[in-house]
Image (spheres, rainbow, N blue to C red):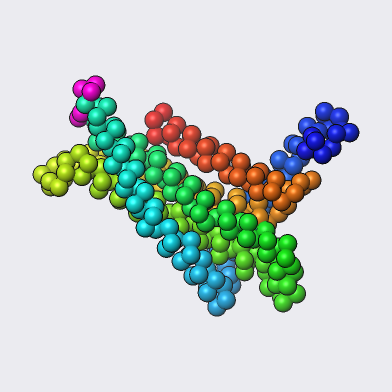
Amino acid sequence: MINRLPGLSLPDRAWSTVRRWAVAWWRILYLGAVVLVLVLSPSSYGRGTRRSLARHLYLDTAPVLLGFTVLAALLSLVLTRIVVVTALSYGLSRYAMEMVIRVLVLELIPLTAALFVAMRATIPNGTQLALLRQSGRFDELRAQGSDPVRVELLPRVVAGVFASITLAALSCVVALVMGYLGVYGFNLAEAEGYTRMFGRVFTPSVTTLFALKTVFFSLTVALIPMAAGLYDAEGSTQPDSELGGLARMFAVLLLIEVASLMGNYY
């Protein structure tokens, strides 16, 4: 922005940056409210929309399901081994599995699932949405009496949320199983103690925060790339708009993670 407007004074440049920042966040909040209304509206689930929604649910979830499950299993084994060996070296073996669950399941898995869905599904969908808008697809839908947000954006947002929650839930189960196998092996003798320890970690408050964090992660990676694709950044080209949307998405994910850590440990 500074290079494109060299004639502006420093206060004008600062005001322009703040204004663009405020407009971008306002558009995200506004779009989120619109999507919420559409999700709760029965008229959003007509025959054409249902078909599009089912297609996006499948395309955003099924192709990445196996790959992410394998990644989650490998990550679980590696981190479990690191944590257990470190705990043994400091004489804290009794806390090793609890540390694995807190670090892996509570913190890393939901964030990893959200980022994986963002990179594989929602960011490409946001780019595709921008291309559809630029090619005149939205104008065609309006001429036919259809709402482009309802037809093209809503299925992508819902599919992104569904994919993120599904991968997070599945990978948490995989992490718990692989964590147990990594420490105890194929031996069910410790299953009862492992279950009790799991219950001590997942108290009602921790479970509530975990569920809320997963949902907010899913909404963030599903909505912000769509907003970047639906709107051009004021005074910039489309690549800058996508980069700004990516930065805003990571900022929100970081804030959610910090809030979760404060809720769990402070």
- Residue at position x 51%, y 66% in the image: 56
Residue 222's image quarter? bottom right
Q: Quadrant of the C terminus?
A: top left
Residue 141 versus residue 27: which sits nearer the camera? Answer: 141
Q: Quadrant of residue 156?
A: bottom right
In this view, 159 is above or below 13: below
Residue 195 image point, x, y percent: 20, 44
227 vs 82, left or right, is right
Residue 198 visible: yes
Where residue 144 appears, x then y in whole percent?
72, 77
* Residue at 31% over, 48% down: 73
- The region drawn magenta spans 89-94
Tell me where residue 164 appears, x and y as whole percent. 45, 53
Quadrant hosting residue 193: top left
Residue 199 falls inside the magenta stretch: no
Residue at point 48% right, 65% down? 59
Q: Residue 92 lies in magenta, yes or no?
A: yes
Q: In this rendering, would 138 be left or right of 114?
A: right
